[in-house]
Image: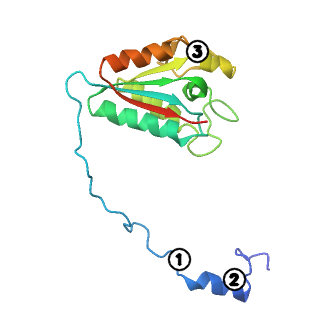
Amino acid sequence: MSETASAAELTDVEQKSLGEIPHPSLPEGSSIYGSTKVFPDYQAENGESYFTLVHGIAHESSVSFVAVLQATRALRKGFEAAIYFYGPGSLNCLATRGFPTVGNSAFPGEHNINNQLKTFIAEGGKVYCCRFGLSLHGAREEDLIEGVIPTHPLDVQDALIHYARKGAIINSTYQL
């Protein structure tokens, strides 16, 4: 291969394999899924709440990010919305994420959860974070994203009771 070549040299069999099915099979922007929404686009009725529990580790669990997105959507539909991070989920609330320095993304999307939590709080959502969950991983309370409300370990159960008694829709995510 010459110094100016940018692609690997392929054998005849490798070339044949690549050519069997044209790529991309559909041009960018092609639709391969329908767009029919099956259920109504519900909006909150007066006084309704949406409560999310998150027990998933940041960047090890897409369920944590999706839960924040769902809570944000509920907030925008008019629900009183709150997210409660506990156990390893507490790590999602750290403002000190970044490498090589705080705030720098070592990979695309490293700050997705941070940014979405800031948006959620700015739009009126409440975010709770269990102090015991932080302590399990040596995380410090002063490193929480601004506006995140630290809570006592016994608050996890009582928060669930509180929102259940309010008739909240409860979304509980759990991943390890």
Q: Amino acid at mark 3?
A: Arg
Q: Nearer the viewer, residue 49 or 160?
A: 160
Task: Using the rendered view, name the quadrant where residue 103 is placed.
Answer: top right
Residue at 57 percent of width and 24 percent of height:
90
**Element under disc 2:** helix
Above/below status of 120 relative to 157? below
Mark 1: give few (<14), some (14-19) or many (20+) Cα within 10 Å.
Answer: few
Q: Which residue is mark 1?
A: 23
The residue identified by callout 3 is 131
Q: CA distance from mark 3 to mark 2?
A: 56 Å
Which residue is located at x 53 percent, y 11 percent?
A: 154
Most extreme residue toward the left is: 46
Q: Callout 2 environment at 10 Å: few (<14), some (14 to 19), or many (20+)? A: few
Q: Which residue position holds label 2?
A: 14
Q: Earlier in the sequence, mark 3 or mark 2?
A: 2
**Would residue 109 be found to the left or right of residue 163 on screen?**
right
